[in-house]
Image (tube, rainbow, N blue to C red):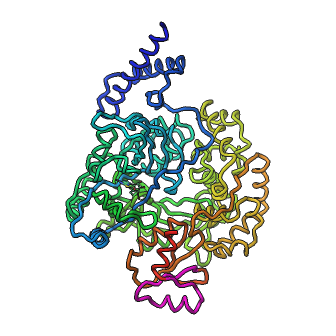
Amino acid sequence: MEKQDDLKRIAELRRVIEYHNKRYYQQDAPEISDTGYDLLMRELQNLEERCPEAYSPSSPTQRVGAAPLSKFASFNHPSPMFSLANAFTHEEIIEFDKRIKRLAGVNAISYVAEPKLDGLAVNLIYENGIFRQGATRGDGTTGEDVTRNLKTIATLPLKMKSTAHHPAPSFIEIRGEVYIEKEPFQKLNIRRTEEGEEPFANPRNAAAGSLRQLDSRITARRPLNIFFYGVGNVEALGVSTHWEALQKLSDWGFPVNQLIERAEDISACIQYFERVRNMREKLPYEIDGVVLKVNDLTLQKTLGNVSRNPRWAMACKFPAAQETTIVKNIDVQVGRMGTLTPVAIMEPVNVGGVMVSRATLHNEDEVLKKDVRVGDTVVIQRAGDVIPEVVKVIPEKRPETAAPFKMPVHCPECGSEIVRLEGEAAHRCINISCPAQLKEHIRHFASRGAMDIEGLGEKVSAQLFDARLIADPADIYFLTKEQLVALDRQAEKSAGNLIDAITKSKNPALDKFIYALGIRHVGERNAKILADHFGSLETLMKAQREDLTVINEIGPEIAASIVGFFHEHKNIDVMNKFGMAGVIPQKKAVNQSAPLLGKSFVFTGTMESMGRSEAKTMVENLGGTIHSGVTKKTTYVVAGSDPGSKLDKARSAGIKIISEEEFLKLISR
Ligand code: IVH
């Protein structure tokens, strides 16, 4: 009897909690306090634990997250996830329409115009109306299974609202964009800064970082949201237009963006583009353009794809958002390699939805070229996730007293001499024990794209360094919880979390580890190339210059830097310490999965089927690179009609020359 009561109460609680979720998340009108809500949730969790037979993948308790995973499983998308080609001007948008008309042999095309949300794409599998599995886009074929994290997103339906009129299909792949709104993003960053963690650069990074958390309880605390804009296996819908598909998604309870419209022709699309562009700042979430999609699904199918991009859709990007503000100061920061970087500290200003108060000025030449001075009014811009930059000074607004910028002659951190090497733009502090450099080095090692040690941001790294608990990145692995607790601001719990995060990072992907080492000229991209090529740290460490320069992207300067790094005694010591601490990067099978990996292309002449930027995206998506001039390392020269002198150069250098047709074959293999 008691069991019956429990089951009844479970059903009731689920209903009540869903109701309050809706009031809170969708209608922005909560009826009960957070504590009241927590009590209901806890009661439901307890009951579900007592009655495992009542388990349901769509219970609201599924949204609160579960114990951490050690890594994400990979997920093969049943239908591939494509990306979009970009247009930047009205002309390019018109060109897109013309191309479609030509290919389809018709003279009228209608479109659906949508905002291009700046988040990350996900693919969700629903079976008979129940959310089963969801994954990130990854390379379009294989992503990461982030089901548990997706379940924490309050606006993501765990169960479709199917009706007799709109029954749920037995299997459907629904596509959408996970994002964070501007305001919750600011709050999240304030909280992180207070907790001594790195703030996220922008809402998209925050969304991606949150969705890729191994601990879904952390994800559950992040203000993630989702909009849906497509279906992988669109046949499952039984509709004939994209517009109807979106309608159906909306009827099933999937949040579909309100700004999506039908556009009868390309001029309506351009009007839409301008209208949405003017609304951009006022929207609660970030967008970086609009997406145009051919409405007719049969026509979409006929048009098909070129490489990874559908011919029936186009991303029309907004030009960078600009604002003016005043330079309050020009700080000089010391980086990991001792490089001195002037940074403009400005009156905070909202640029395209993000508050900006700092912008890098790169080096002395750049400051002098733009002639940025303290007190100047400047135009700054931010394009997509690009770091804010100073575009120009407004000379009329310069105060009379403003003096030209001068680089300091002594390191602002350690007082050592500053030098500028021949042929280099950068000034450097040459003291290799400069604390600013060492701190930066450690911060870089632990950062997101590197070892990703959560909780070891700028502040904590500096704190540990100043307390002399660490002097190099390997020391991190010898820290104890007691040492951390003894530091101020490190409470028992966060110390424990940090130790866990450190332990979790002991078996990193090889490319992340190589990148984390902070070898000069080895950024994320080169680290990946090295990992793919050498497969293990040991092989890389033994590599001679020649072993490195045979790799297409690795030039003599990079090779010298890598060989130099692994020969330096101090670095060898650090590498040994990593070994002793049990930090072992994963080995990689040296498989060249990206078909154009290591191949470089040069284009000359005009191509019939696509523009340069399209070709570039395609080559890069398949792992290849594009260069403007022919060199010994060029793999292919693609000759269109009216080729230029590059063709002669390729002939005399004996480089393989291919036609547009051969190129298309190469990329569609
Ligand atoms: S459609 C084949 N619609 O843009 C169509 N994508 O470069 C593929 N995105 O990976 C996507 N808003 O992350 C589509 N309304 C929208 C979108 C959108 C943002 C993102 C998505 C995708 C990327 C394509």
Instruction: Say above or below: 580 vs 385.
Output: above
Residue 405: horizontal and vertical position, in percent?
Answer: 46, 68
Frontmost residue, 629 versus 465:
629
Q: Residue at x 49, y 81 (%)?
A: 638
Frontmost residue, 261 versus 3:
3
Is residue 635 among the parts visible in the rendering? Answer: yes
Instruction: Say above or below: 335 vs 254.
Output: below
Residue 478: horizontal and vertical position, in percent?
Answer: 74, 42
- Residue range in magenta is 634-658
Image quadrant of ligand 1 equals: bottom left
Residue 296: horizontal and vertical position, in percent?
Answer: 28, 58
Is residue 349 among the parts visible in the rendering? Answer: no
Most extreme residue toward the top is 1
Q: Is residue 641 magenta?
A: yes
Residue 322 is left or right of residue 329, and the answer is left
Q: Residue at x 55, y 88 (%)?
A: 650
Q: Is residue 574 magenta?
A: no
**In which quadrant of the rendered view does residue 21 lie?**
top left
Instruction: Say above or below: 104 vs 471.
Output: below
Residue 294: horizontal and vertical position, in percent?
Answer: 29, 60
Q: Residue at x 30, y 65 (%)?
A: 397
Looking at the rendered structure, the number of numbered marks drawn on it comes to: 0
Residue 618 is left or right of residue 462, and the answer is left
Residue 593 is left or right of residue 664, and the answer is right
